[in-house]
Image (cartoon, rainbow, N blue to C red):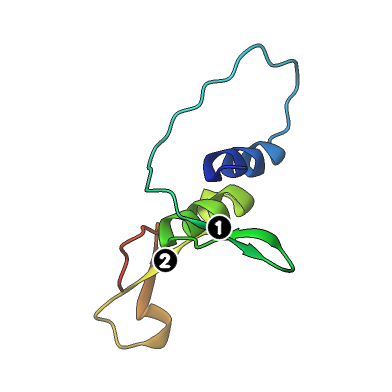
Amino acid sequence: MPQSGTLSKLTLESVQLDGAVSGLTLSIVRAEETQVNEHDLFDGVKGNQTSLELISTLQAKLGLQAVTSLKLTDDPRPEFATQPIMPTANNKN
């Protein structure tokens, strides 16, 4: 299954509906080049996930608010030395 199909499935598995669905719209918020898949003896087909794909997979499984990255601050106190932020593929903090 393509990455977008997997993410859609993971996201929709956690949605509970009160009634029938008469339509569905899918839009891509962020996209990246597809990776070449490798075959893994134990797990079947396995691809090399980019950081953006990993973030998207975790957000689909756990929810947007459950996946964060850390930003360093100038405060030397351990409890205030970092601040949670929304993750991106290029966070280097």
Q: Is mark 1 on a helix, strand or loop?
A: helix
Q: Residue at x 50, y 63 (%)?
A: 48
Q: Name the residue under label 1.
A: 66
**Percent coordinates x, y for residue 55 in the rendering:** 48, 57
The residue lying at 37 percent from left, 79 percent from top is 80
How busy is the neighbourhood of tag 2: few (under 14 within 10 Å), some, or many (20 plus)?
Answer: some
Q: In this view, does 91 lie above or below 75?
A: above
**Residue 58 image offset from top left, x and y in percent:** 56, 56
Which mark identifies residue 69?
Answer: 2
Residue appearing at x 43%, y 82% in the figure: 79
Q: What residue type is labelled 1?
A: Ala
Depth order, front residue of 89/35: 35
Q: How many marks?
A: 2
To which quarter of the image does residue 47 belong?
bottom right
Q: Where is residue 65 in the image (x, y as percent from the top left)?
A: 52, 53
Left or right: 62, with 92 as reference point: right
